[in-house]
Image (spheres, rainbow, N blue to C red):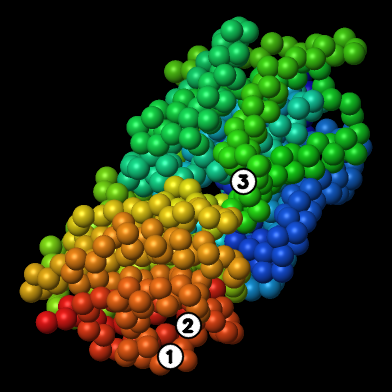
Amino acid sequence: MTQPPPDVRPPATPPDAGTPTRVWLVATLTVAALEMIRASGPLLDRAFATSTVAAGLAAAGTYAAAGLVAGLVLLATRCRSGIPTTAAVLTAAGVLAVARLLAQAVDGGALFWVGLVTVAVAVAALTLAVAFVAGRPAGGRQAATGLLLGCGLSVGLQMTLGTWDAIWRDGWSGWVVAAVIALAPLLTARSLSRGHGGAAPATGRPRRLWALGPYLALAAMILANPAFAASQTGIALGIAGLVLVLSTVVGVWILLRPETWPGPVRIAAAVLLVAGTAGTMWLTGALALVALVVLSVAVGVVVTGTLTMHGPAPRGVLRTMGATAIAGLGIVLPLLLYMLDYDVPLPVDNAWVVVIAALVLALTGLRRRTPDSPPVEHPAPERIPARVNTVRLLLGPAVLLALVGLVPYGTSTTGPDVPARAASDDLTVVTWNLHYGVSPLTAVDLEGIARTIAEEHPDVVALQEVERGWIFGGGTDVATWMAHRLGMTVRFAPAADRQFGNAVLSRSALADTAVHALPYGAGPQQRSALSTTVVTRSGAAVRVTSVHLQHREENTPTRLEQLRTLLADEPVTGPSLLAGDLNADPGWPEITLLEDAGWVSAVDTAGSPDALTSPSTAPDARIDWIFGQQMTFTDARVPTEPRESDHLPVVTRAAPSS
């Protein structure tokens, strides 16, 4: 018997004919893509400083450029058929790793450009990997499993980071997580390359590969967004993250079963996908939580049908480029339309945008197409029972990460326990419009915000434009993160939606909290005010209100109507503070209305009336205020150093009048 030469070895084969490795490849790339989709919101905020049109064009161009990236990768690896090979996937993962690490190393204007390029590369790499995995027997189910598992991993990772993504962190923790996100897909793709895929190569790509776009839009906004889940359902962030991960576990376990689903099951899954999305967007509380779980479980069955090849798509690099570009646009258009409604209102409720995206995805899971030519015969894939399928072991990291995140964010919706009364009768009060946590310097610097607040040693903090899952703010839960970082209790009031509004934080207990919906008026955004009570050391109850009025300069009639509504809903019955972004300068009718009602400005009484608050980089307006009734102000000022928001904070020292 002839022996092979010593230096010739058969290629290594990953376990289970490569299935776990391919699933893990899609999962890790999903994590990377979702992080960059969330990051694209704060990045594009820089373009909004120019105009809404500029931001829209930048967003569409960035995500459509994923098609160009995919085409360049295919050409560089000689995939003339447009069907990705292991070399193409490895190359895309390598480019993504370099881009992601470079994005971690730069900031400011450089981060804007590098970050947007990384978004396009991440979408392209994931799309090519999904095409690579789905283009083989049982590949549609494997790709869907990887996508669902990636959502669970993304949630678990966000929970360990408190929803503040690594790309915005300067310290060692940001670099460690960035390295994991960058290198995990690369190492997995390298394993597949060495093992020749562990099975027969892909023979085509799914016709509906573009449907990856609507799926990722739903994932970024709902399925892999623990801050959204917490704010929409009203449960604690830690519990919300764990529920999302456990729902993913159920969804993946269903996909591990080898049985083929009959038509009625696939139809039911499509219906539940749309119904779950609608319920999640329009319901709150326990009903929203049920809808969210239903959506998370049903989406895997739908995506499996979407990516299963009943006839491969026509070959060609240009066709794959087109499918990838459409997938990119399918991500950004629902998110962009949903968010732009708050500045340029749509003729319908913007929740319909997300529901329509879910409907499009649901329909792709039902559609079958008979191939024009006889299908290529493949050996039947191995039918591995779910209870012994090694893919199930990949669920462990997501669950473990979610449990780690459960420790700091636990079961409380109001943050850490605090004393019943303030430490003094003199209260240090801070008000700050956070611009949903996005800095004009192209950053989401939650630590910088917290450090600026902590340096004032405040007893009470009134915040506006607080986001809890807004993609334009990076998907963070600012209210929860700030409460835990500062050791303060928090109350949050929705405004534009349940992911955006006002908050009050305090080092002592808050009581009798009330949320006041303000008149919409001329629009374009729904506003609210939040009132709550803090008790001083001697027992005096001080009513504190955080408010944000309509922002357009010509909207004085709307702001006056909003103030009249607020003053009627919150009549002064004792010491009171009114703090927030009134979008009105000194001498405007809004300020005159408050002064005529007995409110006294802290800055005008105990500070410098020349202190301006907006924009933070070169202030030319004074629109952020702290007013009081039956309060004595002894100091008031506007710190000029912070640049973590487009506004500067206002700080005052106040005590109930004797």
Residue at the image point whose x is 33% and y is 42% from the top: 235
Q: How many marks?
A: 3
Residue type at mark 3: give it.
Tyr
Give the alpha-carbon distance from disc 1 to disc 2, as whole Å: 9 Å
Residue 180 in view, yes or no: no
Q: Position of residue 24 (x, y in %)?
A: 58, 36
- Quadrant (top left, top right, bottom left, bottom right) of the C terminus: bottom left
Q: Badges 3 and 2: C-beta atoms under 8 Å apart?
A: no
Q: Badges 1 and 3: C-beta atoms under 8 Å apart?
A: no
> Which residue in the protein does label 1 denote?
609
Residue at the image point whose x is 50% and y is 27% from the top: 276
Give the alpha-carbon distance from disc 3 to disc 2, as whole Å: 34 Å
Secondary structure of the residue carrying tag 3 is: helix
Q: Judge whether 340 appears above or below 375 on screen.
A: below
Q: Judge whether 626 appears above or below 369 on screen.
A: below
**Left or right: where 399 falls relative to 525:** left
Residue 314 in view, yes or no: yes
For marks 3 and 2 on the same chain, the one whose residue lies earlier in the sequence: 3
> Which residue in the protein does label 2 denote?
586
